[in-house]
Amino acid sequence: MMPDLFPSIDEWGPERIVVVSDAKTGMKGVLVIDNTARGMGKGGTRMSSTLQVGEVARLARVMTWKWAATDLLFGGAKAGILGDPAGVDRERVIRAFARKLANEVPREYVFGLDMGLTENDAALIQDELGDRGASVGAPAVLGGMPYDELGVTGHGVAEAVATILDVEGRQVAGTRVSVQGLGAVGAATARRLAGMGALIVAASTAKGALVDPDGLDIAALLKLREEYGDACVDHYDAAVQPLGTELVCDTDVLVPSATQDVIDTGLVDELKASIIVEGANLPITPDALNLLYERGVPVVPDFIANAGGTIAAAYSMDMRYSAFRPDTDAIFTTTAEKIRTNVATVAAKSAVDGLRPHNAARALAQERVRHAMEVRGGVTRS
């Protein structure tokens, strides 16, 4: 984790990078607080055996734009633990990570869930720090908002798909969609889109891909996922294809919902999708984004499409110390409204200003962050 200890610092941040370790458990982790002009740092925590500081810094920057794009008053931050999410010392490592950040949590940063962590891990963090406000995303039995379980982020991604199709003059019903990754986001996206009449022609887990031009039985596949996890593809009544097949299959819409940098310039020529909606954070490399824009392929940016979890987290932040449970109907309604509005706004700005969608979305978010920095006296306009 040390070679990229100092990621690029620009006018937006990062403001703080806190690297922590614990000799007893072997824990190594990092917290990146990117920009707090609009509020305290808030973002998810991931656990990965390949984690890098620069990776967390990139994700923290995405959170800065995501909070600003949804016009919610928090700042960009992200945290990560270098380790195996399936390791035998998982609980000890997570507890050690929480202890080492006790000076920052919850005053400067509140834990959330990302890749490799679950609702129960949020409960561990609350227990270790003795504070319900230390983390959002805890199980409902503890008064938390389990937004992964509810599928709020995937619900929002599906709304983004529906909106960009509408912008393009197309209908959801009958549209072919490929979903890479059947984690919390991908599964909820596939379920929602299938319910809207889309044909999910491909889906994948870490164990392989399934492809059916006539549409997969998503209800059956997700039921198998509950029982077998990633191995659900082995129990579905179809031949398992190599990973990556779902990216290049014949589809109208591609929803990469696994991890970052899965689509690079070398893969662009193989893509058949005419629309891409980013379910994961940073799934397309910057050079590939430029190439897709040149080829006229609309891409809905990650911090626009997958903001549902962020919106749910904002509700959870307000409810951390409340005796009442959050209103889930309100969360789903707000998520749909904000994401539909933002997708349409970014598409219009991209067309009028001749900007690739990511640049158009970032310009909107940056204006809000810059204004907040100005009024705080931290920056002036050139």
Image: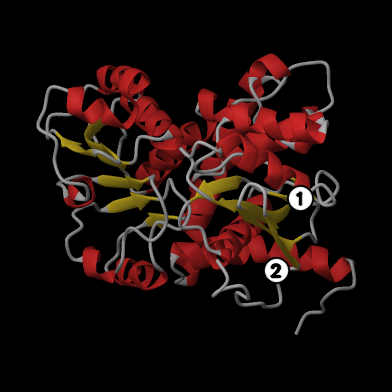
Out of 49 and 246, give the one closest to the viewer. Answer: 49
Q: Residue at x 83, y 22 (%)?
A: 322
Q: In this picture, is 262 found above or below 305?
A: below
Which amino acid does the dot numbered 2 rest on? Pro
The residue where tag 2 is placed is: 14
Secondary element under disc 1, as helix, strand or loop, is helix
Of all residues, the one furthest to the left in this rendering is 239
User: Between residues 311 and 275, which one lies in front from this camera angle?
Assistant: 311
Quadrant occupied by the N terminus: bottom right
Looking at the picture, how far across and down is residue 29, in whole percent? 63, 55
- Please say which color scheme the image uses: secondary structure
Residue shown at 50% from the left, 28% from the top? 151
Alpha-carbon span between mark 2 and mark 1:
20 Å
Taking the spot 82% from the left edge, 47% from the top edge, the residue there is: 102
| Badge nearest the viewer, 2 or 1 | 1
Q: What residue is disc 1 on?
A: 100
Q: Residue 350: x and y, percent?
A: 47, 64
